Structures are given as structure tokens and as C-alpha cells.
Amino acid sequence: MTTIMTTPGAQTRRGRFFRLDMWTATSLGLLLLFGLFLLFPLFGVLKESVLDGEGGFTFANFAKFFANDYYFGTIRNSFVVSLAVTVVSLVIGVPFSYFYTFFKLRGAKFLFVGAVLSCMSAPFIGAYAWILLLGRNGVATRVLEAVLPFSIGSIYGFGGIVLVLSLKLFPLVSVYMNAAFRSVDSSLLEAASLMGSTGLRRIWQVMIRLTVPTLLAASLLVFMRAFADFGTPMLIGEGYRTFTVEIYNQYLGEIGQNHNFAAAIGIVGVVVTAAVFLLQKFAANRFSFSLKASSPVQKRRPRGIGGALVYLYMYALIGLALLPQLYIVYLSFRNNNQVVFLPGYSLDNYRQAMSRLLGRSVYNTIFFAVVALAIIIAVSVLLAYLVVRRSNAVNNFLDTVSMLPYIMPGAVIGIGLVIAFNSPPLALTGTMTVMIIMLVIRRMPYTIRSATATLMHLPMSMEEAARSLGASKLKAFWRITVPMMSAGVASGAVLSFVAIVTEMSAGIILYNNQTITLTMSAYVAITRGSYGLACAFSAILTVLTAVLLAVYLKFTKEEDVKM
């Protein structure tokens, strides 16, 4: 009998190899998942875009897009409207954040909650409500035209899209800027005053320039959200067509369908958003610096006429932002006959909703969100650990790939999943599984970025202490690292959850009667002219969103959230 002796060094190397192999297997597993459910569908869209109706290779779809001004105009329109929304959101969002940060305002918590709630609503509720208010026969339209000596027009077209999206997205700017303004050191402002820079001049020369990186980040997020929005231009765009609406018409239109051409439009959209993203990254690197206030600016009470104007601006803006949702809740209790609202109030709209897939819509919305969120949290925690604690080429590639949905319009992801999983061996189209996959892909960047940022600020000393006491790396990860990451992960996860329950742009491609959600139920009711029913679905969705916002605030307890 032969005895094999092993040295402690050999055991250590063997254990180290095992642990390394375990994390390497995790990296490879995530690489396989991202490859199968993100890169493969994206490749399918690219492949579809260069095929003709007979399956032959061609660039005719792209030639058709760029040669025809109508089609090319949809991308141009999307770019112009997104740029306009970004500018308007900055113009109204930065002052809102400035007043909120530097003044002691009565009802400040209400202002913050109202701002965040307005930007977390479903993407089309605002547009639908503004149609009822400022449409050609809207309530506000009739009142204003009876008072004013001129016609105010209607909500439809370019101006309406900019109005609706700006009121919805300006809170993203203000929430980002809250943290940036609080990071400005009061000594810098005092020094500027001593040098003769006061008032608006000081705000521009000191505060705005010091917060340029945050402004760029907020601008990118607003631009991406506006560029990918489907519901608003679909409902009120009319002649002003955007590329997201054109993708839907080409892929699922009742007049005629051209899947190859829809894929080509989607690829052009991805290229445009990627170019904007890279431009923003380049600009952000040029202005890259960090701020930490050793003596934060003290808030002061607004006084006099100036203080009254501050209060008027803050509450009027929040009132306009919340008006669509409040009006929808009000109308959900009004009697109606399809498109006409009648005198009197009742619960008929909710009774009708109960008989029109309300139970299934609510169940699907919550079930999809819970399952998708569980997957998002698990993947985000593992990926954040790999990127921060075990950085290498593969893990950095995974981090980059995980951000692709951030710059991809939802319609492109929806088309990609249909192409990839429409036939055996993975025939998932029309199932709950593909809906969950879509939601995970679309909304994972929120939690990944939050988890990664949190882990970057956690010292290694706690893990090293656990390992010095005999814990393995895996045990230290689950017992020490994951609990310390919980607050940051929870913050990102609630944002992902809210975005999941209001998802539409990709869901419009994938849903059916069995997988319909609250968002889609409300949209279908609008398109069929059942306005009261749509209000009921939308009101339920608004209440659900408000509850999720309360959970979000409970976890974060801060006002400098990252969305």
C-alpha cells in the first residue's frame, strides 16, 4: 500500500484552484446567459436587417430607409424630439433642483415624492391624460378657447410630445442634480462672491460648471428615455412619426408587415443611441472630477416676492407633472359611454375591468416582476462581485455587455427575442418565459450599476477578516459581502421593479392575451376607444407605482437616487 503525502502548500494551491475554478465557472455561466439571451437576439436583428423576403443577403433595407425621406425622417424626428426634451428637461429641472437644495421649502417631501412619482408612471398615461385635457375636444381646450381670443391648438404633434415627455422626465434631472448641488462646497461660493461673482452669474460660473459631469449623465438618461419612448408618440404624434412607432407599424402593422425592414430601422436606432452614448462618455471624461463638500451650503428660507415666485414655480411644476395621473384617477370613477364621459360617478369602469382581464393583468404584472427581479438581483450581485473583486478581461466584457440594453430601444430587444426564440429547440415566443427574459434584459442595468457602485465603496478588510478566521471566499461572499451590498442592491432593485411594471416598448412586440400586463391592458383599451376602462387600468397601475415608490423611499431614505 502506497501512501501519498501532500504538503500544506500543495493543499493550498489545490484549494485556490478550486475556488478560482468556481468563480471562473460563474463568469462563463453569465457569459453563456448574456450570449444566449442578449447577444444572440441582437445578432438575429442584425441578420434579419440584411435579408430580403427570399432570405438572400442584401443592403436594400438600409438603402430604402436612407433613400426615402419619410423613413429617414422618423429617426431624424426621434433625434430632434429627444434633443428638445433633453433641453427643456434641463431648463426646468435644474432650477427645480437648485431651489429644492438651497431653500428650506414647506412641503419639500411632497415636492420630492411628486417629482419622482411623475417620472415613474407608465410611458403613455401622461399622453392619454393630456389628450383628454388638451385634445381637440379636451376639457381644458374648451375652457381656454372660451376665455382666450385665439385658438390654442391641440396636444398633437411635436409640441405635444415635447410637453408630455419633458414633464415626465425633468425629475430625472432634478434628482441627479440634488446630489451634485449638495456636493458644492460653500467656501467656493463665498470665494466667488468675494471676487464679484454673485446671483445668476455665480450660479453659471461656479455651480453649473462644477456639476457638468452630473448634467451630462442626467442629459444622457433623459435623451435615451425620450428616444426609446413608444407610447407618447404613438398616441399624440399623428403626422410627427418617430422610429419606435415606425418599427411597430412595420413589424405588427395591420396594413402590411415587413420584418426585415423593421429590423433595419431598429439597427439604425441602436447605432444612433450608441453614438450619443459614446459622445456623452467622451464629454464626461473631459470634465471628469469629483466633489465632496467639507462645508455644505446651508439652506435658507425663501422670503419676499422672490420667495413667493420660488414656491409658485415649484408647486406649479409639480402640479402640472402630476395632473395627468390625478386626472386619470378622477376619470376612472366617471360614468362613460366608450369615448364619451357622462355625468355622475360609479365603479362601473372597475367592474368592467374585472371582467376584462384585470385579474390576469394584475397577476401577470406582479408575477413577471417578482420572478424577473429575483433573477436580476442574483445576476447583479454576482456580476458586481466579479467586476469589482475579480476584474479581468472576461468580467469587464460582461460588465460592458450588461449595459447594452441601456442604449438599445425596447422594440429592438422585443424583435430580437421573437427572431431568436420563434422556432425549436427554444420556441418561447408567446410564453411567460420570453416575457420574463425580456424584462430581465431590459431592466437589469439599473440594479447592476447600483450593486457595482455600492461594492466599489466597500473595503476589502471585512472579507479579509472573515477569511483570516477560516471562512472560504464563497462563505465570506455570502455572509459578509452580500449583506453589506443589500442597501445599494435594494435601491437599484426597486427602480428595476418600477420600470418592469410599467414596461411597454418591448412588451408591445411580445405580449398576447395570456401574457398581457396592466400597462398593455390600459394601452389596448385606449386604442379600442374604451376610455373609462383605460382609466381604470391606468389608475390601478398608478396606485401600484405609488406603493413601489414608498418602498423605494423606505429603502433609500435619500434624495440623490440614481435612475
Image (tube, rainbow, N blue to C red):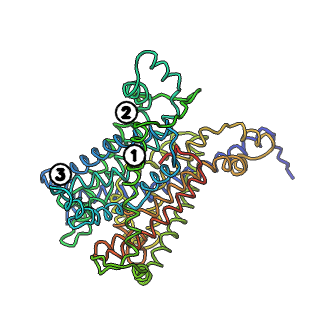
Q: Nearer the viewer, mark 1 or mark 3?
A: 1
Where disc 2 sits, the SS reads helix
Q: Nearer the viewer, mark 1 or mark 2?
A: 1
Q: Which residue is mark 1?
A: 312
Which comes sooner in the sequence, label 2 or label 3? Answer: 3
Where disc 3 sits, the SS reads helix
Residue 306 falls in image quadrant: top left
Question: Whole-percent x and y of residue 85?
Answer: 30, 47
Which comes sooner in the sequence, label 1 or label 3? Answer: 3
Q: Mark 3: which amino acid?
A: Gly
Judging depth in this view, the residue of 163 and 526 nearest the camera is 163
Q: Which residue is mark 3?
A: 73
Residue 399 located left or right of residue 238: right
The numbered dot on residue 282 is 2
Question: Whole-percent x and y of residue 330?
Answer: 40, 69
For this orientation, the residue located farthest to the right is: 1
Judging depth in this view, the residue of 411 and 132 nearest the camera is 132
What is the tally of numbered marks visible in this picture?
Answer: 3
Q: Residues within 10 Å of mark 1 (few under 14, many from 20)?
A: few
Residue 435 falls in image quadrant: bottom left
Q: Mark 2: which amino acid?
A: Phe
In the figure, 284 relative to 201: above or below? Answer: below
